[in-house]
Image: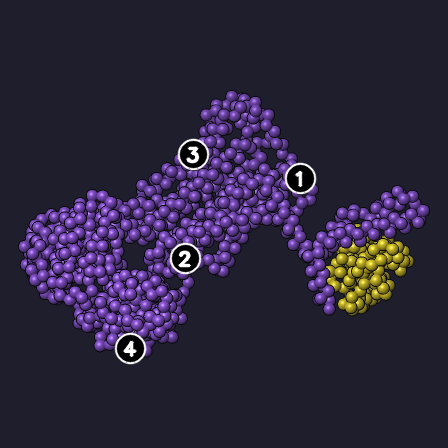
Amino acid sequence: MEFVDNLGMGKPSDLVQGTLDLLILKTLLLDPLHGWAIAKRIQQLSGEVLQVQQGSLYPALHRLEQQGWIKAKWAESETGRQAKFYALTAAGRSQLEKETANWNRLSAAINLVVGEA
Amino acid sequence: MRLVEQIRMAFLSLFRRGQASTRLDDELRYHLDRQIAENISAGMSPEDARAAALRQFGNPALLRDQTRSTWNWGWLESMARDLRYGLRALAHTPGFAVIAVLIIALGIGSTVALFTVVRGVLINPLPYPQPQQLYSIYESNAHNEGIAKYLPVAGGVFAEWQNTAQGSAEMAAISPFQSYNVSSESGRLPERIDAGWCSWNFFSMLGVAPQFGRSFSKAEDSPESEATVMLSAAFWRRRYNSDPGIVGKRIWLDAKPYTVIGILPTSFTYSGAFGGNNIQVWTPMRHEESSIMLTTFEMHDMLVVARLQNGVSLTALLDRLSAVQTRIHEAHPNAHDAVSGRTLLDDSVQDYKTPLYALLAATVCVLIIACLNVASLLVARAASRRKDLAIRSALGGGWMRLLRERLCESLLLSIAGGMCGLGLAQGGLQWLVHTRTDMHRIESIHIDGVTLLFATGIILLCAVCAGTVSAFSSRRKNLLVALHESSRSQTADAGRATLRKVLLVIEVGLTVVLLVGAGLLLKSYSRLRSTDVGVPVENVLTMRVSLPEARYKQPEQKVAFFERLITQVRNLPGVSAGLVSTAPGEGWGGDHLMAIAEHPPLPKGQGLDFQIRGSDPGYFAAAQIPLLRGRAFSPDERLERANVTVISESAAKQFFPGEDPIGKHLRDQFDKTEVEIIGVVGDTRWSISEPAQPMLYWPIYGNDYSSATILLRTPQSVESLAMPVQKMLAALDPDLPVSDVMTLREAINKSTVDSQFDSILVLAFAVIALVLAAAGLYGVLTYLVTQRTCEFGIRIALGARRDQLLGSVLIDGVRPALLGVVLGLIASAGAVRLIRSMLYQTAPFDPAVFIWVTTLLLAVATLASLVPAWRASRLDPIKALRTE
């Protein structure tokens, strides 16, 4: 649960921030989601291990939007209220591929180190 | 694609920021509501569900800020916020804001105005193609460089130079000292205009193309050719109503027909070291000039302009010409023996360099003082907001953030001040262009892009200086100390006051420099004004008439006209009048080399240099030039009997030491005619700022004078005579223009306008500086006294004598002033050297001025300190101890 705390509090390090970005992009790969749903989806997919705090989620979403990786649209949500839905842009898609490749390389490397020890 | 998206987002977050904020709130509220709903469905009561959701959510305001900080334009937003805070803070203290803005406006306005003048007059290139190739070439005296480095060139010398320079430079001669009578024509009045003679290639060499018609051809630049003339744009506009049809027509100059062949462009004005600003028409030199003047090596009335070929330097050209000049000097000892030259631009503006740079330096001083004053005000302001700042700092307000706010505030003040200053500069420049019409190239002055850039630079510099100084005074360390300090602490602001005192010392020092400069210039100006030109100047009117040679060919005709004229003028009630070729203060007026017939002969080529004047018998009495010995001319000493002369006192002293000049004879070294000395009169000056030269008068009724100045003197209001006399002239000859109608006082004012201008401006700057310094001193002391109210209360309660308190505060104020005065006097010692050339009969280290300035400053400093000191000594101890 250390990881979760890191996601939620204090200054996110580059590693953590990059990871959160990757998680968001990956979550949005299938269909557009609003912020709450993104947090939920990450929680579910990680088997309740990763709990993204709002304090990290929304700044990250807005940053990704400013950078043009994702775009937002207001639409009716499943509860009938208007919510802000985020969707991947074409650039975001290729960014996701790049980040995924990076992540795989990095985690494999960490595994090698941790596995040996 | 991604770029498009980024630009769209940048656009949205810039221009739809308010909407985006609302949307962000909606987004976050949606999240919160979903969380509450989830909690309720998990079985919590609505209140618990809400509390739990909020707990999980954290601080909504913080989250909103963190999210917003990822948006573009965050820096812009925070800058706008700083600006808003700054504006609000200034609006709280409008008095401070207005004073600070005015001070900065004065500093920036005067500096920008002077910068514009310096750039327009001294720095901007002349409006010709390749102006750097253009030079003025002069004859010069190898052994007497100081006063005679740049002398006009003789006609024969120019011809030799032109031949020698072939292949390395193109040369043209001009004579800008000429004038013509323009005859009346189809309803236009006759008038006298300044004119220039020039070689045919003068305009083509400069690269000036006429706006209508053409320039002179080589054939037209010869005595045999038909007479031709080119008109200046101003003259063409004024007299011929900008009618291009005048080209090809004839106009009458000095009663002779001239064909107009071209109109010069508006941009063309010639202004050399010997004047020419006001030339209305140009005619070809070789057509106008007598053959003697074109070949002489001894009479100098031409100026030479050269355009060097590519790759030729001025030194190289001067070397070639010097060789020729040496040869000419050997053959003709009256010719000068050396050659000198300078760029055409320097030739035009040399006289204004020192005064303009001195004035610019003065305005920079004012700017620095203004800046320091505002800095000092900001320091005081920071002090009054000390607690506020300390609390903000303690709550985590970053020092950079506080610094930024401070800079923002001073930037606002500087920008507002700069804007007002630009308005001031614009007004000042307009005034200057109207006042100093005598200054060359003044018409080219205007505020342009470079000036605005300069103004922007100054505004920023001002903002940074003033802001940083005040921010420096409230570093974080000080701020925390401020929180600990009890308000009764007596040493609270010693550091801050020291900083303000240092600023004050600099201010006082600069003020001293300005005051010393102003004092010297004023003294020089008043010396100039009180100079005796040799005649009483009040209630004297002068005007000039000249008779066209074509209609007044015979000497008898001219004499008859002059005599009729002066007789009629003298018939006016209460008027005494005289005729003279050149009135006192009216100019050099020509000189001849003479020898005394009764003395041993002088070596060839040498002679006694006399200024020459022609006058009528009644001139001396009318002008009130005292007759010291002998007699004035008698009415019948005219025409062939005009071989008598009256010499001036200095001529008598210099050339006839210990003997009586009356009855001696003077022989003209040029044409060998002899005149007998019949009287000695008092000296008169040809220029207000130049000492009197030895002078000789001979009868104007003879000696072939065709122009004269009428000098009239009445007991009072001489101006009212201008019209009657002009009417009288028109009745005598309706085609005769009258020029230069002005009183002697006006003529003298005109010739001292530059000295007046410089001294008054520097004085104005010095007074501004003095007021600012006094206000600064007053401010610092008042501040100190307020800070120490409590301490003084205690001291008075304990029995301190009030006069001791007064003294201690007074010393506190006078000490930095004294230090400033000492530093200022040292700086002045350096600065006065730079304005030495602007001073007339005033030593740069004039002790009276230095003493005056010191006394004045110390008196003002004492006065400024006295008020707060007096207030401190009158404190009511009870009230003082109760203050916070």
Quadrant for residue B220, please give it.
bottom left
Disc 2 to disc 3: CB gap under 8 Å: no
Task: Name the tint of chain B in the rendering.
Answer: purple
Of the residues shown, which amino acid type is indicated by label 3?
Thr
List the residue tagged with mark 1.
Answer: B391
**What subunit carries mark 1?**
B
Q: Nearer the viewer, mark 4 or mark 1?
A: 4
Q: Nearer the viewer, mark 1 or mark 2?
A: 2
Disc sitting over residue B218 in the figure: 4
Of the residues shown, which amino acid type is indicated by label 1?
Ile
Q: Are marks 1 and 2 on the same chain?
A: yes
* Secondary-structure class at tag 4: loop
Residue found at x 71% / y 66%: B4
**What subunit carries mark 4?**
B
Drawn side of residue B836 relative to residue A20, left or right? left
Of the residues shown, which amino acid type is indicated by label 2?
Val
Query: Residue B351's spot in the image, x, y percent?
Result: 33, 57
Disc 4 to disc 1: CB gap under 8 Å: no
In primary-sequence order, the first of circles 3 and 4 is: 4
Disc 3 to disc 1: CB gap under 8 Å: no
Drawn side of residue B246 relative to residue B48, left or right? left
**The chain drawn yellow is chain what?**
A
Residue found at x 50% / y 53%: B458
